[in-house]
Amino acid sequence: MADITWEAPFCGEGSSCFRLGTDTDGNGYIAVAGQEENPLTDSLEALRTLITDIKAGKADHLL
């Protein structure tokens, strides 16, 4: 597995904690805190788009 640099966990009230990570090959990672050995992987651009869209409210219907 790639050498991933993980950010501090992001935890919502009463929900799971997630971690975002990157590697030197330009990949982005999302994992449940404590389960970093099983991340979702995509490009940094895809991770950036996902975060931007979530902040813009495009995933609010999932809540």
Image: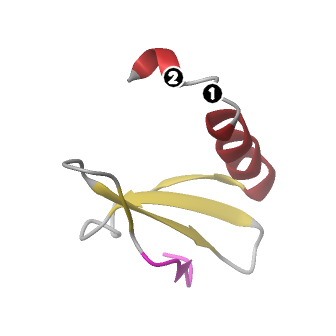
Q: In this rendering, is residue 11 above or below 42?
A: below
Q: Tell which of 38 and 59 is nearer to you.
A: 59
Q: Position of residue 44 (x, y in %)?
A: 75, 58
By secondary structure, the bulk of the magenta-drawn segment is best described as: loop
Q: Which residues are magenta?
A: 1-8
Residue 30: which numbered mark, if any? none
Quadrant of the rendered image containing residue 62: top left
Quadrant of the rendered image containing residue 23: bottom right
Q: Residue at x 73, y 42 (%)?
A: 52
**C-alpha span from label 1 to label 2:** 5 Å
Please name the residue that numbered disc 1 is placed on: 57
User: Is the residue under label 2 in contact with that under label 1 (CB below 8 Å)?
Assistant: yes
Please name the residue that numbered disc 2 is placed on: 60
Please identify the residue farthest to the front as the structure is shown: 13
Amino acid type, residue under disc 2 in the picture: Asp
Q: Position of residue 11 (x, y in %)?
A: 34, 60
Amino acid type, residue under disc 1 in the picture: Gly
Whether residue 44 appears in magenta in the rendering, the answer is no
Specify how the rendered protein is coloured.
Answer: secondary structure
Q: In this rendering, is residue 55 above or below 5?
A: above
**Is 62 placed left or right of 52 in the picture?**
left
Q: Tell which of 60 and 24 is nearer to you.
A: 60
Q: Residue at x 48, y 75 (%)?
A: 1
Q: Position of residue 35 (x, y in %)?
A: 26, 65
